[in-house]
Image: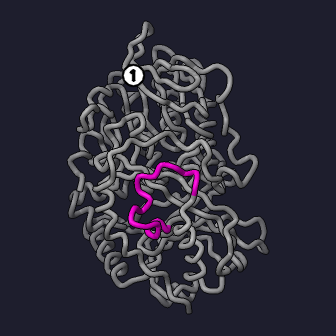
Amino acid sequence: MAALPVPPTEWENHERVFSESPHKPAGLPSVNPTHSFWTHSSPDANPLAREGSEGLLTTDADICIVGSGITGVGVAYHLSEAYLTHGVVPESPLKVVILEARDFCSGATGRNGGHLTPEAYLEFDSRVSKFGVDEAKRSYALEAYTTSSLINIIENNGWSNDIDLVDGGHVYLLFTDEEIKETERDMEAAKSAGWSLEGVTWLDKEVVEATFGVPCPGVRYPGHNVWPLKLVTKLYQRAKEHAGKHFNLTLHTHTPVTSIVNAPSTDNREYVLSTPRGSIACSRVVHATNAYASHLLPFLAGPDGIIPVRGQALATRASVGTEEIKTNSWRANEGAEYWFPRPVRDADEKPLIILGGGRHSSGPTFELCIDDDSTCNLKVGETLRAFLPAVFEGKFEEGNDPEMEWTGIMGYTSMGDPFVGPVDKLLQAGAAECKGHYIAAGYTGHGMPRAFACSEVIAQMIICELTGRDWKQPKWLPTRYLTWENNRNRN
């Protein structure tokens, strides 16, 4: 049996590097990103890639959403649902415009995503210590809510096959004694707090080895994986279908927003957004750019804000059939690597595996403060190529080149949680001038099980403002996510 990968002990320096990161705002997304499996492996993967990139630019809107990932499209989706199904009727049609710098959904969601798996217990003990029991439980409640909401939407609309929804569960492999102790501590803390671990199963080393061929214990809990770009496409199309006398939605791709200025117009619009194609006047702005948030909100640069971090992934083919490669999604090596097999067309097909991680091997910077996804890191690529052959002996060919390899830019915060809510409630200098701006960003590499619920929060805040109602915090939303609270919870 081959030795399992060495745990990434370099993570011990990660917080130090983060805190010492430079206060430089992110640039615009690269105009020539690496080709991701999700965006370029199929000619029809992104039918909205260049939607609204030519012709006349919309010049007036009630709400401009900057970013077309799951957060930005999620805000539009929740706004459309509210106006269609919840009896919210505006005095005039609500005009919503989504602006995207590149192809539709070309950020971390569309490039690096795929795991639709809520955390069941991980870091429960430390969250209780930092935030208290109730706030710790909300961390997992939000992820459970996000996942169940999306699964319900997918299944109720019959999208499962269209977006490659796989319900295979999630297995976390524990390579070291320290990982085992941490997991046991977190699970016990969750039980003591009264948090349900239904569906969570401890797997002894003998069980994991007999079932998966890996000589270490693990934990299995509920989880799904999807084709993220196709999911976001469906959500946008659904919101677009709601267009009518009460709601209007427009998408402009390849239209980067270069600046936002407070310039009240004759139409009572508060802001003007500049793009290379012209300007748009609007009343409210939603920042759904995640890693690139500090480009338009420069006070979010540096460790007190949102730092761009480059993640790397590849698509590699197993050397055995689907019977030996289970449909589980996986994570291991102190969470440094994550992967899952793609659905196969027939029983004889060797599964294609999407694998990400390896950032700890990039050197002293851990790929922090890198907002360029036009290249890959060679050292990270070497780590990823060696990982699966070492873990699953005989199931992956050593030295085999991947079919595709790419990078995507994630947005990290010092506390590991996103900023959600009105921008002017942030404590950073300059934020108070951004009344009418909202943000949901900084998911710290964990956006799929959090972003859609955060986008719902933003949509509900906007609706309450428009209708003169008081916004009420959902029971599943961590208080520390809110812009007027999270600055107080930094490490």
Residue 184 drawn above or below residue 371: below
Determine the residue positioned at 21% across, 64% down. Answer: 129
Mark 1: amino acid: Val
Q: In this view, does 321 lie to the left or right of 483?
A: right
Which region of the structure is painted magenta? 358-375
Horizontal side, residue 479 vs residue 242: left or right: left
Question: Can residue 58 be seen from the camera position used here?
Answer: yes
Residue located at (50% from left, 66% from top): 357
Residue at x 64% of width, y 68% of height: 353
Q: Is the magenta stretch mostly helix, strand or loop?
A: loop
Q: Position of residue 339 (x, y in %)?
A: 56, 68
Seen from the viewer's position, the closer of residues 158 and 390 is 390
Q: Name the residue under label 1.
A: 261
Q: In this rendered view, identify the residue nearer to me: 124 or 442.
A: 442
Q: In which quarter of the image is residue 305?
A: top left
- Figure label count: 1
| Quadrant in the picture for the N terminus | bottom right
Q: Residue furthest bottom?
A: 1
Label 1: how many Cα within 10 Å (few below 14, some 14–19, many 20+): few
Instruction: Tell me residue 262's x, y (percent).
Output: 37, 20
**How are the residues colored?**
one colour
Relative to 491, residue 269 above or below: above
Q: Can residue 475 be seen in this view?
A: no
Residue 362 colored in magenta in the image: yes
